[in-house]
Image: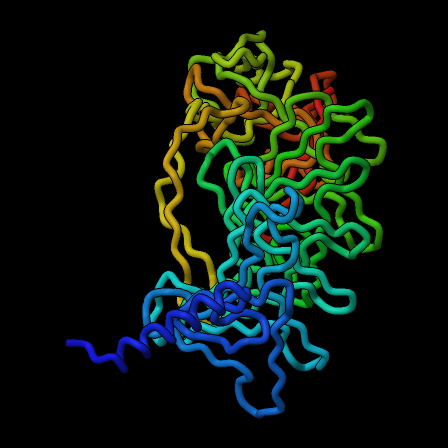
């Protein structure tokens, strides 16, 4: 049975509690103590903590799965319908020391996972806005042990956005990259119809590159741009007086354009200067019914068309006093109209580490223009061949009969074979120029 004293104590405590409620004083209110485990309210008052310690001014350790500290501007009905949500910052960190950090975030886990030192979620707004008046707004430094990959900055875009967008505005560049062990800038694209790099300039040059290496000369050393692919370089112009590919040499001992290998021009060629070392040739078909040899003089029998529609000459071995149209070079074979490329491994060199291997996609590509492949020096009947119609021509074979250097040449007693021209009015094929050190015969082909 409860004693009178205990009943009196309970009544006293109840009365004190009611008095506190009536007077508006609650636990954890402004001016009161901060009570753990309960909701505290300071009303419109600020709460501050000042310390001169050498450690943490305020340390909160979370051993559960929740957040150690959260700052929120909150939301509510406000006063008379105004200020329905806070307009301040969730967390503000400010320092006045040039070597300190406004906010320091670290992830001290020794294991690699999906976490991060700092995560920012902007919702429908920006995830982060970083400004700086004198130094870099953002510095990304990644490090790892052994051969691994860690990006200084990694971005993933979506929709019409970009993984990383940079606006140089009045700066030197929107993006500045330097000193990569494989490349300063590396871009990949898996879609065959989308370029790995797209550059657009409304009034100037879209891409400008300088290669200033002091390496010994090669086809690729010190190049402003180096490209490899089905089309190593593709140039197109869609405006008047434009140039698909413009090459210019501004100093001595330079070439404006150098091409190594078969070169095809589909259109007219205009040269305002001299053509040094040029040798003119034409496509033909052997209509003689017997084989033609390299160096044989040929006469014209007519014209025909190849399967691709190009016009070719019909030639035969020239006879004595025939008008010579040219000299046989070699057989020419039509290349296939399509090839299969890709499906192979490609190695990307990486300085100081294992090379990176990628596999290119396999695809079939149609030939953009007719292509002929050189064949042997003997051309059978009805086979295609290339004949030299003018210029300097060197070939392996016997020197023209009885000819001396500088002598005019014509077809001799044997059909197709050149010899020193006689005093008759027979057609001339050109002049004998002599022999090279490697034994090749040199002719100046100039039919007349």
Q: Is residue 56 visible?
A: yes
Q: Residue at x 65, y 57 (%)?
A: 88
In percent of the image, x 47 and y 12: which residue is there? 307
Q: Is residue 383 above or below residue 140?
A: above
Residue 440 showing in the rendered view? no
Compare residues 200 and 261 and report the one nearer the observer: 200
Image position, residue 121 (x, y; %): 51, 53
Circle count: 0
Please name whichever residue, 37 or 258, is drawn nearer the observer in this view of the structure.
37
Residue 33's place in the image compared with 197, above or below, is below
Residue ID at (32%, 70%)? 64
In the foreground, 98 or 31: 31
Determine which quarter of the picture holds residue 248. top right
Q: Quadrant of residue 91?
A: bottom right
Image quadrant in which you'd find residue 357: bottom left
Location of the C terminus by quadrant is top right
Quadrant where the N terminus lies?
bottom left
Identity of the residue furthest to the left in this view: 1
Against 195, is 40 above or below? below
Camera-side residue of 239 and 342: 239
The percent position of residue 265, horizontal first and vertical second, equals 65, 27
Q: Position of residue 140 (x, y in %)?
A: 58, 66
Q: Please name the residue shown 85% across and 31% down the image.
A: 272
In the shown orientation, is residue 426 left or right of residue 284? right
- Horizontal arrangement in the rendering, residue 210 relative to residue 50 (left or right): right
As drawn, 64 above or below 227: below
Residue 399 percent across, percent down from the top left: 59, 38
């Amino acid at each position: 049975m409860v004693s009178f004293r205990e009943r009196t104590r309970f009544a006293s405590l109840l009365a004190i509690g009611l008095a506190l409620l009536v007077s508006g004083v609650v636990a954890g209110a402004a001016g009161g103590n901060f009570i753990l485990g309960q909701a505290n309210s300071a009303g419109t008052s600020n709460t501050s903590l000042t310390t001169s310690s050498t450690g943490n001014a305020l340390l909160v350790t979370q051993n559960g799965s929740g957040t150690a500290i959260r700052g929120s501007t909150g939301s509510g009905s406000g006063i008379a319908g105004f200020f329905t949500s806070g307009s301040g910052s969730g967390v503000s960190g400010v320092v006045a020391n040039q070597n300190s950090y406004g906010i320091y975030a670290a992830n001290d886990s020794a294991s690699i996972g999906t976490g991060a030192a700092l995560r920012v979620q902007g919702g429908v707004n920006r995830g982060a806005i970083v400004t700086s008046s004198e130094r870099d707004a953002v510095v990304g430094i990644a490090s790892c042990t052994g051969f691994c990959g860690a990006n200084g900055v990694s971005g993933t875009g979506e929709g019409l956005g970009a993984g990383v967008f940079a606006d140089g505005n009045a700066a030197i560049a929107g993006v500045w990259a330097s000193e990569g062990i494989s490349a300063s800038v590396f871009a990949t694209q898996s879609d065959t119809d989308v370029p790995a790099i797209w550059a657009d300039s409304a009034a100037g040059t879209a891409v400008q590159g300088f290669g200033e290496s002091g390496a010994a000369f090669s086809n690729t050393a010190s190049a402003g741009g180096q490209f490899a692919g089905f089309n190593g370089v593709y140039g197109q112009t869609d405006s008047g007086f434009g140039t698909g590919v413009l090459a210019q040499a501004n100093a001595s001992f330079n070439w404006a354009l150098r091409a190594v290998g078969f070169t095809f021009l589909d259109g007219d060629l205009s040269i305002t200067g001299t053509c040094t070392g040029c040798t003119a040739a034409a496509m033909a078909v052997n209509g003689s019914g017997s084989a033609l040899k390299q160096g044989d003089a040929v006469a014209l029998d007519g014209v025909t068309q190849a399967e691709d529609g190009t016009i070719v000459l019909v030639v035969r071995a020239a006879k004595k006093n025939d008008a010579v149209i040219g000299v046989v070079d070699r057989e020419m074979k039509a290349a296939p109209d399509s090839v299969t490329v890709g499906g192979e491994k490609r190695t990307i060199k990486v300085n100081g580490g294992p090379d990176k291997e990628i596999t290119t996609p396999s695809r079939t590509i149609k030939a953009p223009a007719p292509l002929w492949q050189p064949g042997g020096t003997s051309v059978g009947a009805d086979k295609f061949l290339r004949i030299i119609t003018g210029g300097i021509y060197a070939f392996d074979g016997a020197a023209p009969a009885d000819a001396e250097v500088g002598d005019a040449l014509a077809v001799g007693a044997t059909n197709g074979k050149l010899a020193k021209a006689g005093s008759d009015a027979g057609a001339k094929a050109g002049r004998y120029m002599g022999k090279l050190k490697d034994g090749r015969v040199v002719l100046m082909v100039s039919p007349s």
